[in-house]
Amino acid sequence: MNHNIVDYGASADGTTVCTEAIQRAIDLCENGGTVYVPKGTFMTGALFLKSNMTLYIEYGARLLGSCDLSDFPIMTYPFEGKNQLCYASLINTHGAPCKNITIDGGGTIDGNGSALFALEMAENRAKRGRTICIRNTDNLTVRNVKIRQSPSWCLHLVYCKNVLLESIEVHSKYDENGRIYEGIYNGDGIDIDSCENVRVLNSLIASQDDCIAVKSGRGEEGRRVGIPSRDILIENCAFKSGFGVAVGSEMSGGVENVYVKNCTFENMHSIASIKAVRGRGAYIKNIHYENCTLVNRNRDITDSRWFRGALYADAFYGEDEFDADTPAPISDGTPVVDGIYMKNIDVYTVAGNAVYLCGLPEMPYKNVFLENVTAHGKYGMKVKNIENLKTVNVKVTSDFE
């Protein structure tokens, strides 16, 4: 059965806050039913989905985040690797186990981040909300929608299994017409956080920060929870701005079996970044980037603590000054990185290193394989603390040759 939100009192004028009407439609939706959002702009606060339902946002329809912070209650969410007080996101689950949720339809979910970022930061009672935050959900499908302009990360998945993200667009830096969203930073596209069996297919991500970040908690809390991210496929996607596909640096529950295949990266700062730093512990294992191309002519960002190169693995991510020669004592906080594979990669970038690989002196990154890689950067290739680096048909050039 379809539940049209207009029948519950929602107004498509773009200014009337429709939270109560839309939530009523969700709450009354029977198992297997659909909540239908017709054409028009519907302003709303935080909405909470439930099991066995579809949220269908028609092409030409837009859910727009309210500008009133009281419409986004402060709740405890995992964010940046720890449970923290956060403003609720535009689309949420409550956190109790859910199953069989679909978001579809061709419409737009707009977090109104340029407004909410400033309001949330000024009030400063909690961490910023996301556009969509789905937690503890088995069998989630998000298909044929645009997700944009979040106060923080656009789409955050936490403790989910069996996820399909297909033919979606994520815009956290620019709108579709190239106009920048003002006043937003740390605007990741998609964050996959302690999730299993996730597929991201045939999608476009244009991000202000990491386009896709694979995470699993931070520090002692992340190790105690101990839920890894694993079995993740990212295939046939186009990336238009940001930092490509990142693994870490929040990875204290472990990350394994990540495959990035047949993707294009345009005016990106990187294709690949693997970040496992002291204090995180756990592991990153079996990470593959294959059949990918990058062309970057954007000179906005140069080599820095946040960005080491187009293809990089960095044990000192976030540090301006570090000693890569002196080992630290090995502890529960010492991460293990084993198995990074980059095959059939073509890179041209005007910023940073073409390739940067640096592990820990006390725990070198192990088993790094580069095959059929052609990479040109402002600088060439730097390698430190890597155990068993193998290269086959690799050509690296720089502006200084």
Image (cartoon, helix red, strand yellow):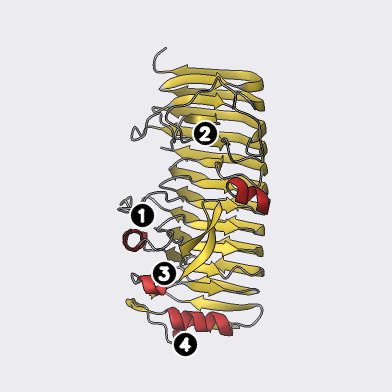
The residue labelled by disc 1 is 175
Quarter of the image holding residue 251? top right
Report how far apart the C-alphas of labels 4 and 3 lie in the structure.
17 Å
Residue 399, image x and y in percent?
Answer: 39, 18
Q: Earlier in the sequence, mark 2 or mark 4?
A: 4
Report how far apart the C-alphas of labels 3 and 2 lie in the structure.
33 Å
The residue labelled by disc 4 is 7
Report how far apart the C-alphas of labels 2 and 1 lie in the structure.
24 Å
Report how far apart the C-alphas of labels 1 and 4 lie in the structure.
31 Å
Q: Which class describes the residues within 10 Å of circle 4: few (<14), some (14-19), or many (20+)?
A: few
Extreme-front residue of the structure: 329
Badge 1 marks a residue whose secondary structure is loop
Badge 4 marks a residue whose secondary structure is helix
Q: Which mark is residue 293?
A: 2
Left or right of residue 9, residue 2 in this image? right
Left or right of residue 78, residue 318 in this image? left
Q: Which class describes the residues within 10 Å of circle 3: few (<14), some (14-19), or many (20+)?
A: many
Q: Are marks 3 and 2 in contact (CB under 8 Å)?
A: no
Q: Which class describes the residues within 10 Å of circle 2: few (<14), some (14-19), or many (20+)?
A: some
The kind of residue tagged 1 is: Asp
Left or right of residue 68, residue 211 in this image? right
Quarter of the image holding residue 340? top right
